[in-house]
Image: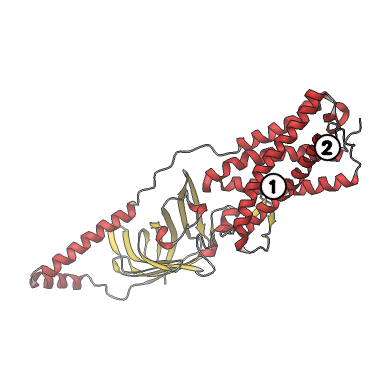
């Protein structure tokens, strides 16, 4: 019996195993949300590999002679139709997926197998719905064709016993007769094996810092109301007391030394995403003995954000997160601070991020003395008011982002 060429046989079983992998992964993607981010990259990478192998299979089909058909009639026509449909699916599914990614609102970069960048297709955003619906429809059609193809092969081998399947087995080897079809099961099981384990929804972290700041703010408002109603004698005593605490001269300015860090972390479906900003500047004026003299301005280059993952780093500058094109920097400014303990302070100011300005508090401590001080601190920022994480890929993110900073400052 005439067989297919070895190249055709290799491509046939390789594509079959990869399709089984895609089916196993594709079923789970929609339910994973942002937790399946890495899995989406695998799905795209394998899809592009299937496209490349299919093009090679078509080339081999016309380069090497194919065995003649063994069956005519409607059964033969059905078999030919399934073959044509499978080729259309193996070409159309990757291409529609590529179009889907290219027209998505959030431009997620694709590195095939973490190495080769895949450019976006120059398609209009209006075609996104067509690409998305087409990709989903092709997936189900492909599964049906895949099952029909397997059923046809089993019919010939088990019921008709015409040896048709040997045309796709090199050397008529019984071991390969079992081993090559088993690759389909291996591909499916591999796809299921890399799925993330189901996790219980993690409770949102309590915004402790914000609650504490709000409580202090309320106490401050009560105190201010009490001062207004207090007798004039008390006001005079307070004024006299304030005069004795005035610093002898202007507060010193400080220069931030190289090696500092501003980091951030946020919960993500039970996991934690952590990163940092590589570029930022700080202008600080403050007398540690008189914290009310503080004048602080921190400017962060939002394009320098990184979480150590090329895929996610490519998403951060987009409109769903930092909107760097329109708002390249974020700033925190504060006039005055207050002591909360030995070498501990709180500064209430304004955070401007993504074009939105909101009140924000930070806490920090100082160590060292004289002209060199080490600064470390933290803040808890609610991301929703700033429109950070406003798309479908952010559904699993916690509402609060923890920010930490540490650097050394030298008095000018």
Residue occupying image coordinates x 83% and y 33% = 168
- Residue 97 in the image: state x and y as whole percent: 65, 52
**Element under disc 2:** helix
Report the residue marked by disc 2: 9
Give neighbour class at mark 1: few <14, some 14-19, many 20+ (Cα, 10 Å): many
* Tag of residue 47: 1
Query: Contact (CB < 8 A) between labels 1 and 2?
Result: no
Sort mark 2 into few (<14), some (14-19) or many (20+) by Cα contacts within 10 Å.
Answer: some
Between 166 and 328, the one lying in front of the other is 166
Residues 96 and 330: in front is 96
- In three-dimensional space, the C-alpha distance between marks 1 and 2, rounded to whole angstroms, equals 20 Å
User: Considering only vertical position in the picture, is 298 above or below 249?
Assistant: above
Q: Is 306 left, or right, of 331 in this rendering?
A: right
- Point out the residue furthest to the bottom here: 249
Where residue 278 appears, x then y in whole percent? Answer: 53, 61
* Viewer-proximal residue among 27 and 369: 27
Can you give x and y, in whole percent of width and height, for residue 78 in the image?
A: 78, 38
User: Which residue is rendered at x = 31% and y = 60% of the image?
Assistant: 345
The residue lying toward the viewer, choosing from 211 and 201, is 201
Identified at 74% across, 38% down, the residue is 16
Secondary structure of residue under mark 1: helix
Q: Which numbered marker is on residue 124?
A: none
Determine the residue positioned at 76% across, 39% down.
14
> Who comes first in sequence, dot 1 or dot 2?
2
Q: Is residue 35 visible?
A: no
* Res 128 → quadrant: bottom right
Task: Tell me if residue 40 comes above or below residue 246 in the rendering.
Answer: above
Q: Residue furthest front?
A: 73
Does the rendering let one see residue 129? yes
| Quadrant in which the C terminus is drawn | bottom left
Task: Work out which quarter of the rendered image holds the N terminus and state it.
Answer: top right
């Amino acid at each position: 019996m005439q067989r297919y060429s070895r190249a055709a046989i290799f491509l046939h079983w390789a594509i079959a195993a990869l399709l089984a992998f895609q089916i196993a992964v594709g079923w789970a993607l929609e339910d994973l949300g942002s937790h399946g981010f890495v899995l989406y990259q695998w799905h795209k990478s394998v899809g592009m590999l299937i496209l490349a192998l299919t093009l090679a299979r078509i080339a081999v089909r016309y380069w090497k002679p194919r065995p003649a058909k063994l069956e005519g009639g409607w059964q033969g026509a059905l078999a030919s139709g399934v073959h044509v449909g499978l080729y259309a699916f193996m070409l159309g599914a990757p291409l529609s997926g590529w179009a889907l990614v290219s027209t998505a609102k959030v431009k997620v970069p694709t590195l095939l197998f973490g190495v080769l960048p895949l450019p976006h297709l120059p398609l209009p955003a209006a075609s996104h719905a067509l690409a998305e619906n087409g990709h989903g429809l092709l997936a189900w059609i492909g599964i049906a064709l895949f099952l029909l193809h397997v059923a046809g092969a089993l019919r010939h081998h088990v019921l008709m016993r015409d040896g048709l399947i040997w045309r796709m087995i090199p050397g008529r080897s019984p071991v390969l007769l079992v081993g090559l079809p088993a690759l389909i099961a291996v591909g499916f099981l591999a796809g299921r094996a890399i799925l993330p384990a189901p996790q219980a929804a993690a409770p949102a972290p309590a915004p402790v810092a914000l609650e504490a700041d709000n409580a202090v703010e309320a106490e401050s408002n009560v105190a201010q109301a009490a001062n207004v109603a207090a007798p004039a004698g008390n006001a005079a005593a307070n004024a006299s007391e304030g005069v004795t605490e005035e610093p002898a001269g202007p507060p010193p300015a400080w220069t931030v030394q190289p090696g500092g860090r501003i980091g951030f972390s946020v919960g993500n479906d039970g996991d934690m995403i952590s990163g940092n900003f590589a570029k930022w500047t700080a202008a600080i004026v403050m007398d540690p003995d008189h914290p009310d003299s503080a004048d602080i301005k921190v400017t962060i280059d939002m394009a320098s954000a990184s979480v150590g993952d090329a895929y996610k780093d490519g998403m951060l500058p987009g409109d769903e997160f930092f909107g760097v094109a329109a708002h390249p920097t974020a700033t925190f400014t504060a006039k005055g601070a207050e002591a909360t303990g030995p070498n501990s302070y709180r500064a209430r100011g304004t955070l401007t991020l993504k074009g939105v300005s909101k009140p924000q508090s930070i806490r920090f401590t100082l160590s060292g003395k004289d002209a060199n001080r080490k600064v470390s601190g933290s803040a808890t920022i609610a991301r929703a008011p700033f429109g950070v994480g406003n798309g479908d890929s952010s559904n699993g993110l916690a509402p609060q982002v923890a920010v930490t900073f540490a650097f050394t400052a030298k008095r000018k």
